[in-house]
Image (cartoon, rainbow, N blue to C red):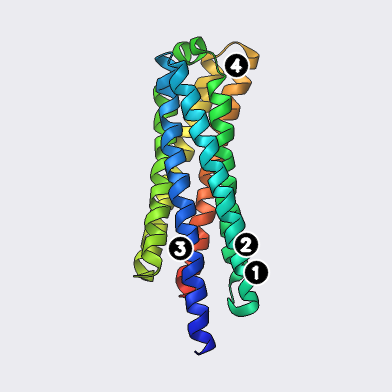
Amino acid sequence: MYSGELEVQAKRKALAVLQDEINRILNASRVLSTVPKLMVNKDKTGIKTALQEISSIEAEVENLRRKITRDVADVGGLILNRDNILNTAYTMDEIGGYITGISFKLSNIKLTTIKTSHLDKDLTELIELVVDEIYKLNEIIRSLNIDAGKAIELAQETQKIERDIDNKYRIMSITALNEISDTKELLLMKDVIEAIEEMADKCQEVSDSFILLALSL
């Protein structure tokens, strides 16, 4: 078998693991989007279940990242753009970590803070925008083995979502400053909002990496 064919097989195997990784991240982000409503409904059991589910998914993502690291190491120099594949896997792992951190901090914000600042709906909408961005990443990686051009087109769509996230992040930051008087609660809310925005930036990094992968297939 030609080395070129071996490289294609190795890339497809790596992409399959990346797809599993992004699927789990997508599931975790969807669970995260339910947390604000659970808090407003005072559903402590639901919040606890959501946090446990997110933590479990993060562990799965980490295991997949380790797997792809081993797989790429096994093929040695066969994959020319192996650094990009590894960086993508590690960045996706970071996104999983963001989801866990956000869910924990969010669940510790007082209900009165969320209600008086009227940020519960905005928080859900902001997280759902990130869910949309991650869903696009899922679509991109599905397209990589079929239509690289379509993958690149989808990657450009994530940029628009990321801009929408930036705009909402700025509006929510001002709202928090104006509506939350308790310093500790304000800092916690700002941490949550900023972490969501930073997670969106990580998603954009993954999208950019997918473009490089698309161009190499």
SS at circle 1: helix
Between 27 and 212, the one nearer to me in the picture: 27
Foreground disc of the pair 2, 4:
2
**Which picture quadrant has residue 68?**
bottom right
Name which of mark 2 and mark 3 comes first in the sequence. Answer: 3
Name the N-terminal-most of marks 4 and 3: 3
Residue kind at label 2, given as amino acid type: Thr
**Do the CB atoms of the residues marked 1 and 2 lie less than 8 Å apart?**
yes
Q: Which mark is residue 73?
A: 1
Name the kind of residue labelled 4 in the image. Glu
- In space, the residues marked 2 and 3 are separated at their CA atoms by 13 Å
Whole-angstrom CA distance, mark 1 to mark 2, is 6 Å
User: Which residue is found at the position 46% from the left and 37% from the top?
Assistant: 167
- Mark 3 and mark 4 in contact (Cβ < 8 Å)? no
Residue 124 placed where, x, y %?
41, 29
Mark 3: secondary structure: helix
Q: Give the structural element (helix, strand or loop) at label 2.
A: helix
Badge 2 is on which residue?
Answer: 69
Position of 54 with respect to 146 (left or right) is: right
